[in-house]
Amino acid sequence: MTSTMEGDTIAQRTLAAEFRIFGKGAHTGQPVCVTVYPGEPDTGICFLRSDQPPSRGLILARWSNVVSAQYSADIGNHAGVSVRMVEHLLAALRLAAVDNALVVLNGPEVPALDGSAAQFLAQIERTGTVAQDAPARTIVLLRPVELREGDRYVRLSPSLNPRLTVTIDYPGTPLGMQSIATAWDRDLLKREIAPARTFGFIGDHTELMKRGHALGADLGNTVVVDGEHIRNPDGLRFPDEFVRHKVLDAIGDLYLAGWPIRANYEGFKPGHALNLKLLSKLMGQQSDAWVLVPSRDVKRSPCGARAALLPASV
Ligand SMILES: [Zn+2]
């Protein structure tokens, strides 16, 4: 069950122990403590609000529990209890191949930390993961599923060597048009995508705050674009950090399927709302477009990590 030989079924994994992180939410600005515990086999990723009565606080990280996708992926339950901004932690768990975990937090939002998945991932890797006595499963696409809104689209399609391809276009800003195409290689994605931070435009901030968003956003957790300039004293982590962050968001959003999805992902001007509508379409309406199969180890792409991360042709 725990063999990782080529072609063999692999086991579900969880954390070897719990870890704890303190921070503040980018939207609420509230301080929050998150403890991520090992999860039982076949339970997936679950969130538990410890500041709520135990019967009301549990929320499964599933597409069907999404309550808002306007600024972040927010999930909630029938008791009206919600957790905002789950996507970066989910991306870290996905990249670390964690199938089961219980995320306990004492507030309404996952801490933003540095605005990326890097610190969550570092904590998971320090803690370690262990195989469990249950087979891991993966969603495999049988046909493409696409969602379009105007000129924007997101698309999942079958592939033996899945890739993530994203293009963003912010005319008149330092971002401009950026594209990236990367192999679905966890080591590569941990290194090149997980540290990419969320971003925001200074001109939007006042309006967002009036509506109760981005109250905790600052230069420590957001790349702040001010006209032609980046406000953060240390600048960018990558010249194309913005489009890399959109890849990270897609990885986190898509883990709300409940299992890893093995498919090509393409996004043209994507966002949480488009990703989560696509996921809802795939999982809810087009369940004949995929099958859930035992996960198997797949031989690495022969092109290697260096060639695997290329600018996409626009
Ligand atoms: Zn994000």
Image (tube, rainbow, N blue to C red):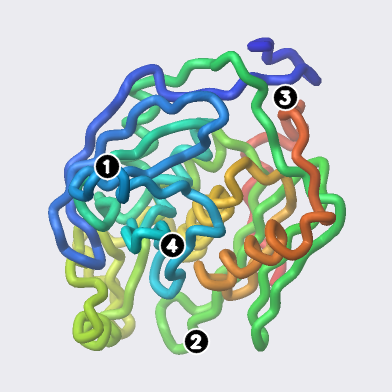
What SS does tag 2 mark?
loop
- Do the CB atoms of the residues marked 3 and 2 lie less than 8 Å apart? no
Nearest to N terminus: mark 1 or mark 3: 1
What SS does tag 1 mark?
loop
Nearest to N terminus: mark 1 or mark 2: 1
User: Which residue type does callout 1 highlight?
Assistant: Pro
- Do the CB atoms of the residues marked 4 and 2 lie less than 8 Å apart? no
Q: Is residue 153 above or below residue 74?
A: below
Instruction: Tell me: 154 left or right of 205.
Output: right
Label 4, label 1: how many angstroms apart (C-alpha)? 23 Å
> Mark 2 — residue?
171
Nearest to N terminus: mark 3 or mark 2: 2
Q: Nearest to the eye among marks 1 and 3: give it.
A: 1
User: Which residue type does callout 2 highlight?
Assistant: Pro
> Mark 4 — residue?
73
Label 1, label 2: how many angstroms apart (C-alpha)? 48 Å
Q: Is residue 52 above or below residue 12?
A: below
User: Which residue type does callout 4 highlight?
Assistant: Ala
Tell me how many marks there are: 4
User: Which residue type does callout 3 highlight?
Assistant: Asp
Q: Position of residue 69 (x, y in %)?
A: 46, 70
> Mark 1 — residue?
54
**Looking at mark 3, is its residue's CB closer than 8 Å to ligand 1?**
no
What SS does tag 4 mark?
loop
> Mark 3 — residue?
297
Q: Nearest to the eye among marks 4 and 3: give it.
A: 4
Label 4, label 3: how many angstroms apart (C-alpha)? 29 Å
